[in-house]
Image (cartoon, rainbow, N blue to C red):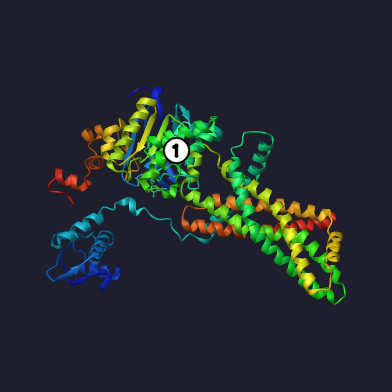
Amino acid sequence: MVLHLTGDWIAQETGLRDAATVQRVIAEAGGAARLRFETGELGRWDSALVAFLHALRRAGAATAEPAMELDDTGLPEAARRLLALAAEAGPSAATPAAPNGDPLLTRVGRRSIANWAGAVAAVALIGETVLRSLAALLGRRVWTRGVDVLQSMREAGAGALGIVAIVNALVGGILAFVGAVQLRRFGAEIFVADLVGIAMVREMAVMMTAIVLAGRTGGAYAAQLATMQGNEEIDALKALGIPVFDYLVLPRIIALVAMLPLLYLYACVVGLLGGLVVSASVLDLTTTAYIEETRRAIAGTQFALGLAKSVAFGALVALAGCHIGLRAGRSAADVGRAATSAVVAGIIGVIALDAVFAVCANALGI
Amino acid sequence: MSGAQDDRLNVHGLTLAFGTRVILRELSFSVRRGSIFAIMGGSGCGKSTVLRAIIGLLRPAAGTILVDGEDYWAATEAHRTEISRRFGVLFQNGALWTSMTVAENVVLPLQMFTQLDSASIDALARLKLSLVGLGAAGERMPSELSGGMRKRAGLARALALDPDILLFDEPSAGLDPITSKRLDDLILELRDGLGATIVVVSHELPSLFAICDDGVFLDAETRTAIAHGSPGALREGCDHPTVRAFMTRARPEQLTAMEDPHGRR
Ligand SMILES: Nc1ncnc2c1ncn2[C@@H]1O[C@H](COP(=O)(O)OP(=O)(O)OP(=O)(O)O)[C@@H](O)[C@H]1O
Ligand SMILES: [Mg+2]
């Protein structure tokens, strides 16, 4: 059987022959044991020709019955050599990929097992945090370096002062404005101070700050750890026997747990100031009266509640970021996904935890 | 063959897999005290994976790895960490900690595992960097280094704690012949001077022949070891076509074609 190859075979210009053409050639060969080539009229050629011959050979070996052999003596010398090189990819390249057409039940099962493993790992991380913190408090050897803690504190705390100020001043101002419009109708302008004070100190300051840190720091933690994973930096730590938890996770948790309460207090001050500025400009209130009313409205317990929340939120944001970063894959896309899910998990977690706090505080009558 | 007493590493019946994908099966070899042991084989045959199993990053699907007679993977995690301290590892891509300078990369293991004061630690780190020819690059960040420099910095870090089992994944890949020769000398010096046992993964034939006195050849197709012995001995005496081709830098079918002019292809 002889196949005549004619004309130009240039991938960019003439395109590649598709699988149907290959099958047609095989079918027309009709069980011939050898296929020879006639290339007298062959024009210019490049990979397009080689790809066609390669496909033909694979199809000839796999689908034709009996297997068809290519007799490459008629081909141009260079094409023959390239074809021979392509043949050597060998069986290892043809390792079957994981089938993606699994039945629904298998996929559901696999997904559930993965989710369960994720949940177990998250709980394990929380447990490890508690144990290692206790160990540190009891004076055991912990492989955390002070410089790393300070570095994380500076990034998470001092670095966030600007954005925390802007967000909380605006929230305080908005609360004051909404309150002013409503309360003026009842002639109860002075209670704007109560509204802003209680809302900021109990809820908004800590929640807004935690959300800002979830976006700013939680996402960064996840991205950092995921990148380290991809660079084998974490493997290098493990190979040396430096505990990854102590060295990478603990400093970050300590930093956020220490910084969020401080940022919370700062946010309260800025938020109250924002409320004061707006109230003073839209309402007929003196600054002194406003401050006096605020002082009357917010008690120490409100601050205690806010501080308790800030500690919990700090731990949550740091844990979510580190957990997701450490479990991320090793590609650039995985780093992006890890950062995104850390931010989402942080924000949702903060709001959900805040709801739990609200219920508990209500039950306790705080 | 010397007695098992002298084996620092003993790998027996090792099967390695990622999930359900088996990379190597039934792999056995042992590394004598004070030898420079080569892990050879084509690209993608699982050399780096073997190293990952030895240093505790990939749990074998089956088989044992004995380090100085102790079963590495049967030990508790804490004990495994103890054993790992005997290892100095150079990763194939260097795996430097990119948020620290080169010098800090070398300093960190010393800070973590020794009680030395910071002046001595700095002096040691400078020494290790000079050993690999990077004395002047200590203050640079890993991202500012060339590929070969990163490799050498990784080597300096592997040497930081003076470990007595060194595992190098392609130490001389990407280095010029002169630096590569210097590295060979350094490896010989580490063995002869400090008594270290060294396992190298390498493709560089000249350096394999020059320094290695034992080795194992892995094959991607059969997924196991197809030859044992030093690179020099394999070049002279091994009949396996893949090994011959590797050692003489030929393509396997060219080799068979040379021996058998009426090739059966
Ligand atoms: N994380 C992983 N998940 C799945 N398969 C992997 C993973 N890492 C490596 N492999 C596969 O394992 C095989 C061996 O990889 P390995 O890195 O050990 O090769 P190697 O012998 O070191 O090659 P080279 O000389 O090119 O570095 C390859 O086929 C590779 O595709
Ligand atoms: Mg490798």
Question: On the rendered image, what quadrant is the N terminus of chain A found in?
Answer: bottom left
Q: Quadrant of residue A5?
A: bottom left
Indicate the chain on which mark 1 is placed. Answer: B
**Taking B2 as reference, is A140 left or right?**
right
Question: On the rendered image, what quadrant is the C terminus of chain A found in?
Answer: bottom right
Residue B51 in percent (x, y) is at: 41, 39
Residue B208 in percent (x, y) is at: 29, 36
Residue B89 in percent (x, y) is at: 43, 37
| Tally of marks | 1
The residue indicated by pointer 1 is B157
Ligand 2 in which quarter: top left
Residue A180, placed above or below residue B33: below
SS assignment at label 1: helix
The residue that appears at 63% across and 51% down in the rendered structure is A318
Residue A120 in sight from this viewpoint: no
Which amino acid type is shown beneath numbered disc 1? Arg
For disc 1, the neighbor class at 10 Å (few under 14, some 14 to 19, many from 20) is many
The residue that appears at 50% across and 56% down in the rendered structure is A334
Q: Is mark 1 within 8 Å of ligand 2?
A: no
Looking at this view, is B10 or B33 the one in front? B33
Residue A93 in sight from this viewpoint: yes
Residue B38 in percent (x, y) is at: 33, 35
Residue A51, placed above or below residue B134: below
- Residue at the bottom extreme, as displayed: A185
Q: Quadrant of residue B49?
A: top left
Looking at this view, is A344 or B244 the one in front? A344
**Taking B71 as reference, is A2 left or right?**
left
**Taking A234 as reference, is A319 left or right?**
right
Residue B179, placed above or below residue A12: above
